[in-house]
Image: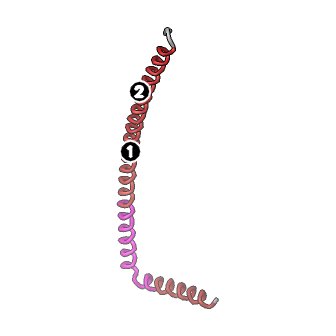
Amino acid sequence: MSDTPKDDLEALRADFDKLREDMGKLTDSLKDMGAEQAHEARGNLNDRLDAAREKLRAGVGSAGQRGHDYYEQVESSVGERPLISLAAAFGAGFVIAKLLDLGGRR
């Protein structure tokens, strides 16, 4: 303990200055930790986004290939039976036309 109140006040001021300095260092450390964690999270997000893009590209490629295969299969079926294909197309068109005509009469 100090001998005079003035010495106590000076010691208290020194303690507050030290506390203020420590709080500043703590704040800086917390900012650095937050920035590091944000950078890490951004990296993880970018990795997930890249994986999702690759999965989407693979899915689009697969769907495109299936569509192309289906188109070739239909083309082959029409080539093998052109009259049946023509009759089916005419029938489907007739039914659709009748459905659309009924919708206009309501």
Mark linked to residue 99:
none
- Give the mark, 1 or 2, whose residue is nearer the N terminus: 2
Task: Using a 10 Å C-alpha cutoff, classify the residue at mark 2 as few (fewer than 14 neighbours), some (14 to 19) or many (20 or more).
Answer: few
Asked if residue 31 is positioned above or below residue 19 in the image, the reply reads below
The magenta segment: 61-86
**In the rendered structure, which amino acid carries the disc numbered 1?**
Arg
Residue located beneath label 1 in the image: 42
Q: Secondary structure at mark 1?
A: helix
Q: Secondary structure at mark 2?
A: helix
At horizontal 46% and vertical 24% (from top left) the residue drawn is: 16
At horizontal 35% and vertical 68% (from top left) the residue drawn is: 68
Prevailing SS of the magenta stretch: helix
Magenta highlight on residue 102: no
Residue placed most toward the observer, 30 or 15: 15
Say left or right for 65 vs 85. Answer: left
**In the rendered structure, which amino acid carries the disc numbered 2?**
Glu
Residue placed most toward the observer, 55 or 24: 24
Task: Using a 10 Å C-alpha cutoff, classify the residue at mark 1 as few (fewer than 14 neighbours), some (14 to 19) or many (20 or more).
Answer: few
Across and down, in percent, residue 56 comes to 39, 56
Across and down, in percent, residue 89 comes to 46, 83
Across and down, in percent, residue 30 comes to 42, 33
Within the image, what quadrant is residue 40 found in?
top left
Residue placed most toward the observer, 24 or 47: 24
Residue that sits furthest to the right in the current view: 106
Coloring applied to the structure = secondary structure
Mark linked to residue 21:
2
Asked if residue 23 is positioned above or below residue 65 in the image, the reply reads above
Query: Where, quadrant-wise, is the C terminus in this rendering?
Result: bottom right
At horizontal 47% and vertical 14% (from top left) the residue drawn is: 7
Residue placed most toward the observer, 84 or 74: 74
Asked if residue 102 is positioned above or below residue 78 in the image, the reply reads below
Q: CA distance from mark 1 to mark 2?
A: 32 Å
